[in-house]
Image (spheres, rainbow, N blue to C red):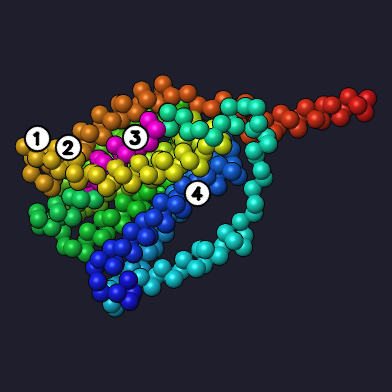
């Protein structure tokens, strides 16, 4: 698009970018599952999401700077992708093969279990509600004369900062909330609901900034948590497929959100804009309750069947046999 002026060609190129993101995001999380287990895996999933949020902050600023020169120039920022493409080729080590380790256990099954589709649907419903702030945030700020167009970008940048922070500390927060099973997944919905309600009640830019920050905290936590939950409930061999399904449902939720939330808001007698946030808040609170019981009813993969545990048990058994042989 740096060399284009035809909107349809530009949209086609944006679709290609979306396709690339749809391939890359689940693969990145699958690499985390290949390399890490337990608390370290949760930490790395959170860090991966935090870095994506951090990149969003940097590229939003870079895009704004380049757009000030010429809107075509914003697309030159994608040239940095060459560096990001080279880094894994040069520095990412090949993970140890785990296929032999998990033979004879439930981890060997490559079929995605039904519970993963349930989690993916929960993620899609989360995104249907979350997209309300994306669709209506700017409308509220401009139509009600609360702020200037430039402040819209600031508000969404603050939301990205919130996502960066919660992704960075995801593992620690998740460990605390998992003390009550179901509470961690419910938090994905209720934190965003709090942010939405703050936005709904706010009538100044400072109030909206605070609301967007809280919404971003929910975004970062949910973005990390859904992938972490997938890794907990899906056999190792099916992780890549499970992450792909989760990403697909997440994108589907964002795409169909206007076609669901706008008619729903109208059917309830509300006008577009601020009332839509109230509808989204109610939806998130209700879905949070469903998520609480869904999580409690969803079994996790036993620790004894995870690749690292099997490998450690095998090594211990071999060492024991060696000790006996030496004796």
Left or right of residue 260: residue 170: right
Sequence-wise, which precedes: disc 3 or disc 2?
3
Q: Are marks 2 and 1 in contact (CB under 8 Å)?
A: yes
Q: CA distance from mark 4 to mark 3?
A: 20 Å
Q: Which mark is residue 71?
A: none
Q: Quadrant of residue 303?
A: top right
Q: Quadrant of residue 118?
A: top left
Mark 1, residues whose alpha carbon is within 10 Å: few (<14), some, or many (≥20)?
Answer: few
Determine which of the numbered discs, if any, sits on residue 279 in the image: 2
Assess whether mark 3 and mark 1 are in contact (beta carbons under 8 angstroms). Answer: no
Judged left or right of residue 173, residue 321 is right
Query: Which residue carries the number 4 mark?
Result: 27
Q: Nearer the viewer, mark 1 or mark 3?
A: 3
| Residue at mark 1 to residue at mark 3: CA–CA distance | 24 Å
Q: CA distance from mark 2 to mark 1?
A: 9 Å
Per the model, the C-alpha gap separating discs 3 and 2 is 19 Å
Residue hosting label 3: 121
Residue with the mark numbered 1 = 268
**Looking at the image, can residue 191 be seen?**
no
Q: Earlier in the sequence, mark 1 or mark 3?
A: 3
Say which quadrant the N terminus sits in: bottom left
Decide: few, some or many residues near mark 3? Use Cα within 10 Å; few <14, some 14-19, many ≥20.
Answer: some
Residue lying at 33% horizontally and 59% vertically, measured from the top left = 15
In the rendered image, residue 80, in percent from the top left (x then y), is placed at: 46, 69
């Amino acid at each position: 698009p740096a060399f284009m002026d035809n909107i349809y060609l530009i949209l086609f190129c944006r679709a290609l970018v979306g396709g690339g993101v749809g391939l890359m995001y689940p693969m990145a999380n699958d690499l985390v599952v290949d390399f890490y287990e337990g608390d370290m895996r949760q930490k790395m999933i959170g860090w991966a999401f935090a870095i994506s949020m951090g990149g969003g902050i940097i590229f939003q600023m870079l895009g704004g700077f380049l757009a000030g020169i010429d809107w075509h120039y914003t697309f030159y920022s994608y040239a940095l992708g060459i560096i990001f493409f080279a880094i894994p080729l040069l520095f990412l080590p090949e993970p140890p093969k785990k296929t032999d380790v998990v033979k004879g256990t439930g981890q060997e099954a490559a079929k995605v279990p039904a519970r993963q589709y349930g989690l993916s649907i929960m993620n899609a419903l989360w995104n249907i509600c979350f997209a309300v702030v994306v669709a209506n945030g700017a409308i509220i700020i401009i139509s009600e004369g609360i702020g200037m167009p430039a402040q819209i970008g600031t508000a969404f940048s603050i939301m990205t900062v919130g996502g960066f922070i919660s992704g960075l500390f995801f593992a620690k927060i998740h460990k605390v909330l998992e003390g009550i099973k179901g509470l961690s997944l419910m938090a994905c919905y209720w934190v965003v609901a709090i942010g939405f309600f703050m936005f709904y009640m706010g009538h100044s830019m400072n109030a909206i900034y605070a609301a967007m920050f809280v919404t971003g905290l929910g975004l970062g936590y949910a973005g990390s948590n859904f992938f972490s939950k997938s890794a907990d409930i899906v056999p190792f061999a099916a992780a890549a497929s499970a992450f792909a399904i989760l990403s697909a449902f997440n994108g589907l939720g964002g795409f169909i959100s206007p076609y669901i939330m706008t008619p729903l808001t109208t059917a309830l007698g509300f006008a577009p804009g601020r009332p839509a946030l109230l509808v989204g808040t109610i939806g998130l609170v209700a879905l949070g309750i469903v998520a609480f019981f869904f999580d409690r009813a969803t079994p996790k993969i036993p620790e004894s069947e995870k690749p690292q545990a099997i490998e450690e048990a095998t090594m211990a058994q071999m060492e024991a046999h060696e000790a006996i042989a030496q004796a």
